[in-house]
Image (spheres, grey):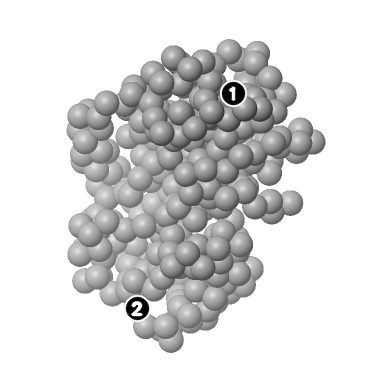
Amino acid sequence: MNLAEFFQRAIRYGIAYDPRKKQALKRIKNPYSDSLILYGDLKSPVKKILVGIDIEVEEILLADRIKQNGGLDLIVSHHPEGKALANLYRVMELHTQILSRVGVSEKIARALMEERIRQVERKLLSLNHLRTVDVAKLLKIPFVCLHTPADNLATYFIKKLMQEKKPKYLKDVLEILEEVPEYNLAKKESVGPRLLLGNPFSKVGKIFVEMTGGTEGSKDIFSYLYRKGIRTLICMHLSEEHFQKVKDINLNVIIAGHISSDTLGLNLLLDRIDAGSNLEIIECSGFRRISHR
């Protein structure tokens, strides 16, 4: 497998598990502006890779040491860097489609998301987004980021898990999540799934899983979700600003965990990319390789 094939597989599986309608996405070569080959020869072989949730200058320097002491073909970051970071806001349109699929008017969802997308775009303008990519180029190490494709798989996995297990109470949701190896490991590190809002013995009701779409959606969407029958949110994380909004809506909130959810998504994606290729994967930056095959 070469770099181009590795990346194409990642995008193909990102689309396969995308919560939107697949037909429109299949006409686009890469619908994920936050997932790109940041540096590298497309024909270069991929066998030994360093995978991390965040890859910054420190991890690139680590990769160079590994390269010198036994070889390394590729660095894979979950969170975007370079051009992919600068364009993160573009994938947030995904939120509009997700919300419309649970019954929120597309007009309302689009109006709420427009300002949120502009807010994230403005925030990204100040970042030195090329810093890490420049180091990878200087050290001549191929560098890829895979963000939304992995998040799509994590979202699909958790939704399917809840549909199969049918938890009745919030405590049941926590117990189900803690059976997932990535969340079980996170619990041992004191960052496991956590009930943020609600009583352990409160009924779960209809669940909304928010784990994809670049970053958090609009803070003003929660009342609309409640009107559509949603009673429990399962999120990777929740900012303080969003927390202040959601706590007045009477919604239950379970934080599955940020790094553990990212790790879950990456593991599910790597399972599919790696089918029959026997990649050698080195863990770093919070990532732990666990196969779900």
In this rendering, the answer to whether 154 lies above or below 135 is below
* Residue drawn where x is 32% and y is 67% of the image: 227
Which image quarter holds the N terminus?
Answer: top right
**Residues under numbered marks 2 and 1 in contact, where contact means CB atoms less than 8 Å apart:** no
Expressed as whole percent of the image width and height from the top left, the position of residue 287 reads 53, 47
Q: Is residue 202 left or right of residue 197?
A: right
* Residue drawn where x is 25% and y is 29% of the image: 127
Expressed as whole percent of the image width and height from the top left, the position of residue 209 reads 45, 59
* Residue drawn where x is 24% and y is 70% of the image: 247
Number of labelled discs?
2
Q: In this view, does 103 lie to the left or right of 261?
A: left
- Mark 1 — residue? 68
In the displayed orientation, state which residue is furthest to the bottom: 201
Q: Which amino acid, mark 1?
A: Gln
Q: Is residue 74 left or right of residue 138?
A: right
Expressed as whole percent of the image width and height from the top left, the position of residue 139 reads 48, 17
* Residue drawn where x is 59% and y is 25% of the image: 67
- Mark 2 — residue? 198
Image quarter of residue 194: bottom left
Camera-nearest label, 2 or 1: 1
Chain-order first, disc 2 or disc 1: 1
Compute the Cα span from label 2 to label 1.
51 Å
Q: How crowded is mark 2: few (under 14 residues within 10 Å), some or many (20 or more)?
A: some
Secondary element at tag 2: loop
Q: Which of 159 and 176 is in front in this view?
A: 176
Q: Which amino acid, mark 2?
A: Gly
In this rendering, the answer to whether 276 lies above or below 197 is above
In the displayed orientation, state which residue is furthest to the right: 276
Expressed as whole percent of the image width and height from the top left, the position of residue 68 reads 59, 23
Q: Is residue 93 visible?
A: no
Secondary element at tag 1: helix
Image quarter of residue 54: top left
